[in-house]
Amino acid sequence: MLLTAGLVSFPVAVGMAAIHGIYSLSTLELWSLSEGSYSLSMLARLAQEPMSAEKLVSLFRAPGDQKKSARLEALKSSGQITIGENVALTNRGRRMALALLALRRLANFSNPG
Amino acid sequence: MTISLAFVAWVATVAFHVALCRLPGLRGPVTLFAVAALTGGVCLAAVLGQIWGMTAESVGALLAFAFGCELYLFLVTLSFASVSANILTRLLSGQVAASQLDAAYSGEGMSEQRVDRLKLSGLVEDRQGRLILTKRGAIIVGTIVRLRRLFGHEPRTTRIVRNNERWVAAATALTFFVLMIAPAGATLWTDSATALFEEAIGYRFFYGLRILFGKEQPWLPQGQTLGVIQHLFQLALSAAGFAVNDVGMRIKAFVGLNAVCFAALSSLLLYKLCRDVTNVFSGIAIVSFLYVMMNGSTAELWWYSYPDYPLVTLIVAIISLIWTWRLVTKRTVSLISTNEAIIFGLFAGTVAANKITNIVYPVTLGLVYLTIYHRNVYRLFISATVSLFAAWITISIFYLNILSPIMYINGLKIFLLSQIHSTDYDSVVGFLVRWTFGEPQSMLFLMPAFVAAGVITGLFLPKYRSMLAFIPGIAFIEYFLYQRFYSWSTIEAYLFAWFSWSMLFLLTASGYRRLFSIVVAIVATFGALVSAHNLTKRSREALQTYSAFNVGYTELAKDIAGKRVLNLTSGNAYRIESTFSSMCKGGTDIFNPTWGDSKFLTRQLPLYSCAVRQNLELSLYNIDAIIFRQLLPEDANQAIRRNEEYFSVSLDKYNCNTIIPVPDGSFVACFVRANTKPQIE
C-alpha cells in the first residue's frame, strides 16, 4: 500500500516485509519449540527430578507413540502418504521428500533421527 | 540494487555453508551456518555502507538478507530434525511395511535416540546411573519455561467459560463499541467534528503531518504513545490517496479512524475482561459502570471521540483492571519472572509517554504486586525505571530537539510550583465549598468514599488487602482533581475511580452467589441506559452549536477563497472555532506560538496565516483579508478595537462588513479597501 502510494522505496518496502517475516518465523519457531519439543520436554522433566535413562525413556514411551501416530495421520490427511499394510509416498509426498532430502544434502547431514 | 546485492550475499552465504559442511573435522550444521551468515552479513553491511551509507535502503537490504538466512536455517533444521520429514525421506527408497515403520519410530526408540542426543550435546550427564542437567541444560530449561508461560502453554487455573457466557460477553463488548463510536459518528454526520475537536486536530493532526512529512520536531509534553499510533493513521490516509494539504475529508477520516480503532480495541479488551472475571454478569456491571463514569464528566463522551490522549488512557485503565484481576486471583507462581518484570516496565514506560498522570496505573499495579510478593518485587522497579528512562531518551531522540526535554523539565517545575502556590489561597474551606456546590468536579464526593472503602477493606477484610494498593492512587487523583479547575481534566479521575471501584466490586463479589452479580448487572445496565439517554439529550444541543460553527466556517472560507488571509486570535476564547483555529494551533509551536514556526505548513497553506501573541510587530503587508471572532457581549466594532489594541495594528484600510453569525457572536471578515493596499510598516 505504502509502496504503491510512493511513500516508501522498494528496498524499504522489502525491509519492512522482512521484519514481518523475521518476526513471524521467530515467533512460530519459539512457539512450536516451547509447545511440543520432545527433547525439551525431557529436559524439563529432568529439571524436576533427576532419574535413570531407563525411567526417562519409559515415561516418554507413550507420548512418543502418540506423537508418531499423530504425525503419520497428519501426513496421510495432507495427501503425502498412503497407509495400508504398507506405508508409501504419494506423488505429492515424493516431491516434498525430494525437497527435504536436497536441503539435508546441502548441509551434508547424514544421520537423521 | 541494494536488494540484488542482498540476494547475491545470501546465495554466497549458502554456498559458503555448503562448503563448510564438507570440510573434514567440522561438525554441527547450525553452528557452521552461524559462522557463514555472520561472515556474509558483515561483508554485505560493509559493501552497503561503503557505497550507499547506512540509509533506510541499506537497512532494508540487510533485513532482507537476515530474513533469507533465518528461512534457510529453518528449512534445513526442519529437514533433519522433524519426525515427519524423516518419515518422508525414509520412504523415498520404497514402500515400508507399517509394522516396520512402527518399530523404527516407536516411542521407546525415539526416546532412546533423544536421550543419546541430549548426552552428546552436553545438556545432560550421567552420574552414577542418574541423568542430571548440566548448567547449559538448566539454562535451556529456564528459557523454555519462560517461553511456555509467554505463549500460554503452561496449564492455568482458569475458570470454565460457558458457551452462552461467551455470547453475552461478545454482545456486551459490541454494545460498548456502538456506544463509543456513536458520538464520533454523530459529529461527522452533523458536520460538527472539525469545530468540536479543533484543538486535537491542531495539535495531533497537524503536528503529525509536520513530523511525518515536514521533517519537523514540534514538541508536545504529552500524548507520545498516541502520537505513534496516529502517525500510522496518517500514513494510511496518505496511502489511501488523501493529499497532505487536504484540510477537509482527510481531517474527518482521521477523526473517524481514531474513534473506530480505539473503540474496537477497548471493546476487545472488555470482552476479555467479561470472560476473565468471576462471571459474565460481573463483567456487564463493570462495563456499564464504565460507561456511566465516562458519561459522568462535564466533557461527556466527547472525550473518547476526541482524537487525543484520553483514548489511550481508557485502554490503559482497562488493561490495568484485567492485569490486577489476574494478579490477585490467578497466581500460580511464587516469584515475579524476568519476562513479567520486562513487560511491566514496558507498560510503565508506554503509559508515562502518553500522559504523566497515567503512571498512577503502573504505580498501583506495582503496589498490588507488593501485597502479594515481598521477595523480588524490586525487579519491577528496576524494569520500570529502565523503561521510563528509555521512553524519555526515545522521545528526546525522536524529536531531535535538545531543548525539548529541558522544556519538559521546566513544564514539570511550573506545574509543581503552581501546586504549591495554590495551597496559599485554596484552603480546605475552598475544597468544601466546591464539594458542596458541585462544580464540574461534582463527583468528587465519591473519592473520600473510595478511600474509606479501601481503608475498611484493608483493616477488616485482610483477604482483600490488595485493595490497600489503590489508596495512594486515589489520594493522588483526588488531589489532582482538587487542584484542577479545568473540568476536562476530570477524565483521569473518573477512569481511576472506575478502576478502583471495579476491583473492590470484583474482590468482594467473588465470595457471593451468582444472583448478587446479576442484580448488580441489572442495576448498572439501567444506570447505563439512563446515562445514554441523558447524553443524547445533552448532545443534541452541543451538536447543533458546533454544526453552526461549521456552517459559519464554510461561509467564511468561501468568502475569503483565493485571498491572502490573516486570522487574528487574541486569546483562546477568541478563536474561530473551526479548521481555521486548528490550522493556527497546528502551524505554531505550543509554548511560543508564532505563525511561521512550521515551514512545512506555511508551504502547504500559502494563503493562510495567523497571529496569537501580543507585541509581535504584526505586518499587514500583502494581507487581503483579516478574520477574527466577535464574542458576545461585545459588538463587531468593539471586537475590531480589541484586536487593534491587542496586536497594535490599525484596520482602517479594511472594510469589516462581512459578519457571519455563529453561536455567542460571529465570525468577522475584513477585506482590504480598493486602492488602499497596506504598505510595509
Image (spheres, coloured by chain):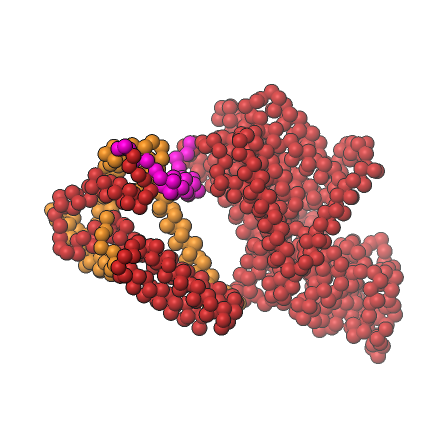
Chain colours: A orange, B red
The quadrant of the rendering that contains the C terminus of chain B is bottom right
The answer to if B60 sits in the magenta stretch is no
The quadrant of the rendering that contains the N terminus of chain B is bottom left
Image position of B234 with respect to B451: above or below = below
Q: Position of residue A68 (x, y in %)?
A: 23, 43
**Taking B20 as reference, is B436 left or right?**
right
Q: Name the residue located 45 percent from the left edge and 32 percent from the top edge.
A: B333
- The answer, for residue B515, to whether it is visible in the render is no
Image position of B33 with respect to A32: above or below = below
Image position of B675 with respect to B326: above or below = below
Q: Position of residue B328 (x, y in %)?
A: 52, 31
Q: Position of residue B400 (x, y in %)?
A: 64, 60
| Front in this rendered view, residue B239 or B594 | B594
In the image, the segment drawn in magenta is B128-157
**Taking A7 as reference, is B393 left or right?**
right
**Quarter of the rendering containing residue B651:** bottom right
The answer to if B142 sits in the magenta stretch is yes
Q: Position of residue B197 (x, y in %)?
A: 67, 54
